[in-house]
Image (spheres, grey):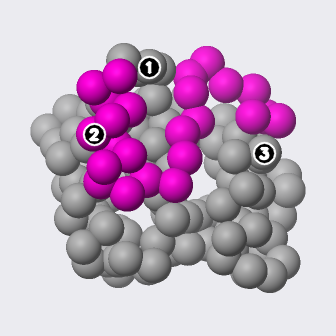
Amino acid sequence: MLNKNVSILLIDDNDITREVLRVVLRSEGYNVVGEATDGGTGLDMALKLRPHIILLDVVMPKISGLEILPKIKEMLPEAMVLMVTASKDSETVSEAVKAGIHGFILKPFNAQKILDTVEGVVAKIK
């Protein structure tokens, strides 16, 4: 599967984080199909766009990433979810793993870390 055929949805309340993710992913030919600033909007977009990969922030206003993660996995079981977080506490990691995530992108991150993590998930799609 070529990168341009891989659709990615970004769900993060931080404008700068979304911009960095978008620029890095698009620079490698990935198709960033949408962006949401909160969990509720992100879930709606995920259901509408049905992306291959969802980059999901943990801490967001209204509904957190951990709150919508089970709903995403239930409604879109084929979607690969990567949590984007600065939180390394074992409770957050454990809860996300139990809910079925496919990996973490820890903040602060650099372009290589983003690409390595996404490429590892893309290899599972192919």
Counting every numbered tag in the picture gives: 3
Which residue does the numbered mark 2 point to in the structure image? Answer: 95
Q: Which amino acid is tagged 3?
A: Asp
Q: Position of residue 17 (x, y in %)?
A: 55, 32
User: How far separated are the C-alphas under marks 2 and 1?
Assistant: 12 Å
* Residue at point 74%, 80% (across, down): 126
Per the image, the residue denoted by label 3 is 116
Crowd around label 1: few <14 · some 14–19 · many ≥20 (10 Å): few
Q: Residue 96 appears at what percent x and percent y? A: 34, 43
* Relative image position of residue 120 (x, y in whole percent): 73, 56
Check disc 1 and report its element: helix, strand or loop: loop
Q: Which residue is mark 1?
A: 88
User: Which amino acid type is shown beneath numbered disc 2?
Assistant: Glu
Q: Give the side of residue 17 with respect to residue 46, left or right.
A: right
Q: Residue 108: name its quadrant.
A: top right
Vertical placement of residue 110 versus 64, above or below: above
* 68 in relation to 2, above or below: above
In primary-sequence order, the first of circles 2 and 1 is 1
- The magenta segment is 90-113
